[in-house]
Image (cartoon, rainbow, N blue to C red):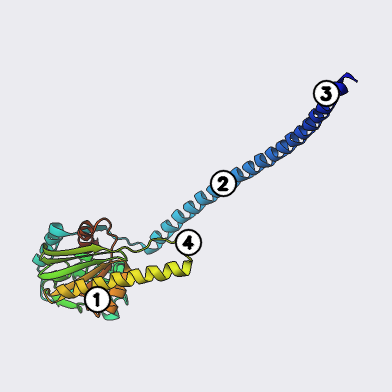
Amino acid sequence: MIDELLGRASLKERIEDLEDENERLRERYEAESDRRAEAATARQEAEQRVNRLEDRIAQLEGELEQVDDADDGVAVRRRIQVRGRRLEAILDRLDSFRTGPEGALTVAVDEAGLPESVRSTLEEPLGDRVALLEDAAPCLCCVDDAGLIAVALSPPIEPTLEPTWDDGFAIDRGTFLPTGRHALALVRTDLFALGVYDGDERVDYRGFESDVKGSHSKGGFSQARFERIRDEQIDDHLERCREAVATRRGDVDRLFVVGQRGVVDTLVAEAGLEPAGTAAVDATGDPESALEDAVRSFWTTELRVL
């Protein structure tokens, strides 16, 4: 009676209801915790199984490589990247080599592989190592009939030399080194840089960046509209690139175009260029520093000692 008069009865009922609700929530929480614990355990077990499988895959790949090596029995003895003075010194050594008449063979190997007549000739000095040449293609192979020298060089400009037998190796340094007056253009979707060179000395430069939208975000642009605007910006950028190349093209003997492969191909095709060489290079930074990186990357030769 007193509880009712003081309003305690309704408060007690409310407290009981809240306690019941609290109990139900606690039970639900405990059940959810159990499910999460089970899920965490399952996830850990799955991760452990993935790790075991990855370890097993790595083990099997290693075993496979060992089997392949055992089957092939051949491997490149040395493989290095060379440029600049170091590359010049290597070419000097090859140029200085002398043997008897038709004792030195110089031959370009393209993606199509070795002609059968050349393959049979090389099998005597190289044996099974002939297979390494096709792995190195496109390349220039220098080998003597005694097998004392056997190297494959992958220069910046793809060699096109027919099989040449002589008392020394036939090496065109313009395939390996920045000789004469030439221009090298670096082009990306948002950046352009062009250097004019006399040998390895830069005598002229032009570079710029263009405002091209990056990856798409959903901030008010539809995907189609975003891509249309980006394509228009890239077209404008490439037009600026074409104009920049055109102003220098007549001043040089050779033109090289490097950068993002798809952008390079588009610029070459749309501008009607006939570059002496193209390459995909990863050059970042502002236009001038990116050009320096591109030049170093492009004028690099891979040397394999067979």
Q: Residue furthest right?
A: 1
- Secondary element at tag 3: helix
Between the C-alphas of marks 3 and 2, the distance is: 57 Å
Secondary structure at numbered mark 1: helix
Q: Which residue is mark 3?
A: 8
Mark 2 or mark 1: name the one nearer the start of the chain.
2
For this rendering, which residue is in front, 21 or 184?
A: 21
Q: Which residue reaches farthest top?
A: 2
Name the residue tied to disc 4.
220
Mark 1 Cα shell of 10 Å, populated few (<14), some (14-19), many (≥20): few
Relative side of 17 to 29, left or right: right
- Which residue in the structure is indicated by mark 1? 121
CB atoms of marks 4 and 3 within 8 Å: no
Between the residue at mark 4 and the residue at mark 1, the CA separation in whole angstroms equals: 67 Å
Helix, strand or loop for disc 4: loop
Who comes first in sequence, dot 4 or dot 1? 1
Packing grade of label 4 (10 A; few <14, some 14-19, many >=20) is: few
From this viewpoint, is residue 130 visible?
no
Q: Is residue 10 left or right of residue 152?
A: right
Alpha carbon distance from label 2 to label 1: 55 Å
Q: Is residue 80 visible?
A: yes
The residue indicated by pointer 2 is 47
The amino acid at mark 4 is: Gly
The quarter of the picture where the C terminus appears is bottom left
Q: Residue furthest front?
A: 5
Left or right: 15, with 68 as reference point: right
Q: Amino acid at mark 3?
A: Arg
In the depicted view, which residue is nearer to us: 19 or 27?
Answer: 19
Location of residue 132 by image quarter? bottom left
Separation of residues labelled 4 and 2 (CA atoms): 40 Å
Q: Residues within 10 Å of mark 3 (few under 14, many from 20)?
A: few
